Amino acid sequence: MKKRKFVVLVIAILLTFSLFAGGGQECRAEGKFLTVHAGSIGGGFFLIGAAMAEAWDKELPGFSVNTIAGGGAQNPITVATQDGLNIGFSIVNSIKEAYDGTGMYKDYNPNGFKNLRTIARFTRPSIFHFVLTKKKAEAADANTVTEMLNSSIPLRLNAGDRGSGGEEGVRRVIELAGSSYDLMKKKSGYDVSFSSTSDAVNSMKDGHIDAFWQSQGLGSAAIQELFLSRVQDVVLLEVSKDIIDRMVNQYGYVPFTIPAGTYPKQNQDIQTFSMDSALVVNSTMPDDIAYLLTKVVLENSERWAQAEPGMIFFPKNVQNAWKNTGCPLHDGARKAYIDLGYIKE
């Protein structure tokens, strides 16, 4: 009899605990997760992704929002081939190519990933920075990327995460300059490596690489760290006009000038190019989820600018975040823009 009472008591306690733990969190108990595919650890996408994930986690009842490292060029494929509870940071150029089935995405799906949708474009220029040690620049007498690549001076280059939108842009510049990763590796003393932004910065600070070429937001903390740590030894290379013109005409990049003074002891403007970025989701994402995600993004624009310097332009252009996104806007996101008065019906 005592044993039976004990069993009943245990069951009652367990039921009470389960009801208490599940109160208001039914979806968490069912294991509903929203995964944010950001960028390289330490990079701008990762910083913004972590900030947005924190906000989304509070605003989406019953969901646990997680941020993981990803690649801007790979993220559209990941989002298109997984369920509707994934969101990716990517480059508008990459989103358009993935949707159309062109460029690097032709081999994955020549018909295009027509289930891709976007919820917001950031007006966040992802600017290509070509950082080189001053010692190497002087040895090669190089002021531009092409001059460095055409010199006989050995170069240990890190191009960021393999498969990221930044790495894709770096590879294209190298190829337009008449070289390639394979050709570079065949040269004596040359090496090309790939890693996260934070690992690349640490490698450069420790003297293990000579150059870090990647896309970053204006005033990037990672680039600032390099200049502050090795202020006498680091310079920014320019991209020659002919390469910029071809990047614009062939791939849709945008010319960009890094203003003098953006980084310590950067005494002159640097001519380079940039690309814009956006949030991409699957068309199967429920409308109510896309609506809430979008609303949080639009209503907290100043917060994202504080999280990552490259987002400084977003608050002034938030009303246009639904335009030129590379693929169709998600229906749930469109409703958020309408409700906020940014899209007029």
Image (cartoon, rainbow, N blue to C red):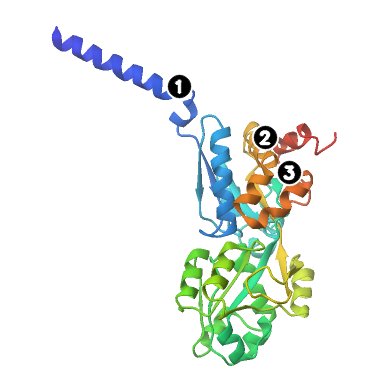
For the residues labelled 2 and 1, say whether their Cβ atoms are less than 8 Å apart: no
Q: Earlier in the sequence, mark 2 or mark 3?
A: 2
Q: Position of residue 251 (x, y in %)?
A: 74, 67
Q: Amino acid at mark 3?
A: Leu
Q: Residues within 10 Å of mark 1 (few under 14, many from 20)?
A: few
> Quarter of the image containing the C terminus?
top right
Q: Secondary structure at mark 3?
A: loop
In the picture as drawn, the residue positioned furthest to the top comes out as 1
Q: Quadrant of residue 61?
A: top right
Q: Quadrant of residue 155?
A: bottom right
Answer with left or right where residue 25 lies relative to residue 254.
Answer: left
For disc 3, the marked residue is 329
Q: Position of residue 14 (x, y in %)?
A: 31, 20
Q: Amino acid at mark 1?
A: Gly
In the picture as drawn, the residue positioned furthest to the right comes out as 345
Q: Earlier in the sequence, mark 2 or mark 1?
A: 1
The Cα–Cα distance between marks 2 and 3, rounded to whole angstroms, is: 11 Å
| Whether residue 112 is visible | no
Q: What residue sits 56% from the left and 76% below the top?
A: 231
For disc 2, the marked residue is 291
The Cα–Cα distance between marks 3 and 1, rounded to whole angstroms, is: 34 Å
For disc 1, the marked residue is 23
Q: Position of residue 127 (x, y in %)?
A: 68, 65
Q: Position of residue 86 (x, y in %)?
A: 56, 44
> Quarter of the image containing the N terminus?
top left
Q: What residue sits 47% from the left and 70% below the top?
A: 202
The mark closer to the camera, 3 or 1, is 1
The mark closer to the camera, 2 or 1, is 1
